[in-house]
Amino acid sequence: MKKTILLVLGICIIQCSVNAQSNALIEKVSAKLNIVNDYVAMGVMKTDVAFIKASLGKVKVYYKKPNLLKVKKEWGISLLPKGGVSVTLNSLLNNKQYIAIESGMQMFKGKQLQAIKLIPTDEKLDWVISTLWIDPVEALVYKTFTTTKENGTYEITMEYGQYASYGLPSKIIFGFNTKDYKLPNGITLEFGDEDPAAKQKALKQKKGTIEITYANYVINKGVSNSMF
Amino acid sequence: MWPIIQIELFKIYKRPRTYIAFGAIAALILVIQMGLKIDGEAYAAFLMKDINDTLTVDGKVLNGYLICYILLQLLLVHVPLLVALIAADMLSGEANLGTLRLLFTTPYSRTQWVLAKFVAASIYTILLLIWLAFLALFVSMWVFGRDDLFLMKSNYVVLIQEQDVFWRYLGAFVFASFSLLTVAALGFLMSSLANNSIGPIVATISAIVFFTILSTLNIPLFNVVKPYLFTTHMNNWKEFFDIQVNESNDAITGSILNVAKIKNSMMVLTVHIGLFVGASVWIMKKKDILS
Amino acid sequence: MSVIKVQSLSKNFGALKAVDQLSFEVEAGQVYGFLGQNGSGKSTTIRMLLSLIHPSEGQIEIFGQSLTNNRSAILEQVGAVIERPDLYPYLTAQEHLTLFAKLRKQKISASKIEATLSQVGLLARANDKVQTYSLGMKQRLGIGIALLHDPALIILDEPTNGLDPQGIADIRQLIKSLSKDQGKTVLVSSHLLSEIEQIATHILIIHQGKKMAEGPTSSLLDPNKTIVQIKTLDDLDAKQKLMDSVYRSNILERSEGLYLSIPKLEIPALNTFLVASNIALLSLESKNSLEDYFLQLTSTY
């Protein structure tokens, strides 16, 4: 009996110590992100979905604490993963309503990253679970994998450049699952000219990505709420 | 030949029937535009049902360019019928009226008259198309504004940037003029075979309906003849609105997916126009004017 | 000089011979009456003269030129009204004349158009649409179009059809004036002898596509002349013997029967010739006049 109590105690102590380490890393990341109250970033957006043919488009990304984010195409129509924008890093970390569990080190693009799982403590939150891959040295998140309640799973990959000190990526890639796309020929009035190759491609490839490459950030210069 | 073309144009201008097609197009377009203005969002939501499951589309999807595309999709199927009303009556209507003998006893040859009449019918057809373009494109742009063209095809979606759209419409209208001139030429051929107005109009419309059905049915037996049917090619103006993508799946601005298909269709339509008009000239040269 | 020269002209519509080996000549300045019952082949012949119908065989020369090879040049000098005055109902008389004026090489002035409208009595209604015109007015407008470019040859197919007596008189007067005052050559067709005899200087009678009689009106309608029908046991032999005699020019062609147009006083001499030529004569009957003869043709069919 004693042995069992000691074992459980031991595990709890180790666990607490690991969680404490995870929380410390998350805190470090949060602290970096907290430097930024708002930003406006110029970028180029690329949409890669099997059933969508779209060209690169210039976008402006607006952010304001705690979790307001808006991607606006300079002109024209923009396509964003449904709900994907709302599960960005800031929205995950800002309210601190989560439990962080360390889940080992993993190699990602040549970097040794700490994987940390976040479980929300508030049932009202949109997401169910999220995994963050963090560089413990730079305190930068390189990848997140988030499962939402309503909009499926999103994978967000980030690359960093000159704004790394603010925890802001130079490139962000939203990965998401796509559903089948099909409109009846009777509606599109496209008879007899179906391209079988395009159809095949659309069926096979069920993953889509939207990639934004940032050119520059204007940080902490104030962003009006009307932008969101 | 210019004087007789002028005469034919003047007669078309003076005929009350000429304006039926212009009126019909205006009525159709305005009704559709009104419907889409009032309830277009619901229509767009219906079209984008599959997309909205995955993506958030931000922007003015239901803009003038998309409205024009929807209108052309609907109308370019029906405008040929209106073209047939005039073209299929050009020779037979005069035969029926008895005025063909007035024309054929002038110093101009029958070949000249037939060609002049076809030129006049072609000018009428092109004016009808310009009217359609004005209402469908420019009025839509004015009423619904402009934005990127978010085009939902059967198996995929094409997003064409606003500045890359207008020239495509110009191309599509030029292509459509070939399609409609083929219909005019067919109507003309039917017209050369009859001495009354109704027969050739009905025959032309029937031929278009019949060949359109053959062109749209995916039955192996019909697939053999499909490439040679003008109806297979008439709707290929849509090819102007499909775009090439590079290896990274980025759409290439200013590109057309299948230029060869457009060229081939235009060639097939041109050959049909030549054959139909040539046959009309031959028939009219041989014909005894008994009316 | 022959304005129209037709040789062995035929037109077949399937098995039907609408015109059968028809030959005739129209001289300059003549009013040439083309007489025949409805369906006799008049309109078909006129349409062939205007290149509306392609002949099955035969030659047509107008102004000394082949119609086949010089159609445009010939039609530049021809004005025609064929059967009904079919016009564009949605155009006015003024618009009709303005349009058709454009089709001629020579420039036709607005004053000429006005003069033509006046000539055919349509000046007051020049700007009314043709759909509001009576048949007579349409006919006059048709003639106006035919006369507009001052043609040397005018072809009028049944120009008095459907007109009231005043309209008929007006057209008759116009045709006479065209020939007499302006020296035009006029070919006019009708199924009414009474109509033709009042205006034509020469008459050709056509029946079932064949020429029945041809000659100056004064000669054909000479009250001293008569049509004699000869019935024999062998018409072919009789006709051959007459062809070889002085009566050759008096023979009237017809598909059946043998007819001669001769002065009444020559009937005894003809009888003597037939007997002397050993022709087995059954009867020799005088039809009194060309009118009787024509009436017989039209009543038989």
Image (tube, coloured by chain):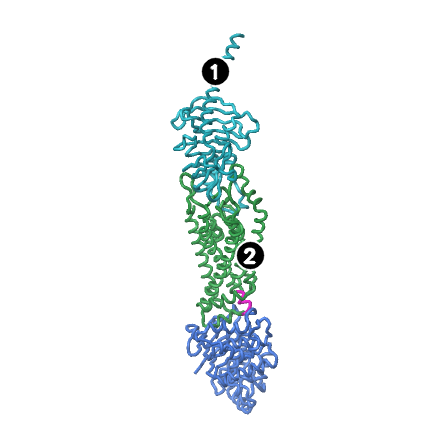
Q: How dense is the environment of label 1, judged by Cα within 10 Å: few (below 14), some, or many (20 and up)? A: few
Q: Which residue is mark 2?
A: B26
What range of the chain is rendered magenta? B92-98
Counting from the top left corner in percent of width and height, residue A38 is at: 47, 34
Q: Position of residue C128 (x, y in %)?
A: 57, 73
- Determine which residue is flagged by label 1: A14
What shade does chain B have?
Answer: green
Q: Would residue B197 be seen by someone viewing this image from the given angle? A: yes
**On what subunit does the disc labeled 2 rest?**
B
Query: Is B240 drawn above or below residue C156 in the view shown?
Result: above
Q: Nearer the viewer, mark 2 or mark 1?
A: 1
- Reply yes or no: does residue B94 show up in magenta: yes
Q: Which chain is cyan?
A: A
Instruction: Name the residue: 55% across, 67% down.
Output: B96
Q: Is residue B81 above or below residue A96?
A: below
Which amino acid type is marked by label 2? Ala
Q: Main secondary structure of the magenta part?
A: helix
The residue lying at 50 percent from left, 73 percent from top is C98
Q: Which mark is residue A124?
A: none
Residue found at x 42% / y 47%:
B254
Q: Which shade is chain C? A: blue
What is the total number of numbered labels drawn onto the structure image? 2
Q: Is residue C229 magenta?
A: no
Is A126 left, or right, of B281 in this rendering? Answer: right
Residue sitting nearer the eye, A146 or C18: A146
Q: Secondary structure at mark 2?
A: helix
Q: Which residue type does callout 1 highlight?
A: Ile
Q: Which residue in the rendered view is the most extreme toward the front?
A: A221
Q: Chain of mark 1?
A: A
Q: Nearer the viewer, residue C166 or B33?
A: B33
Q: Quadrant of residue A57?
A: top left
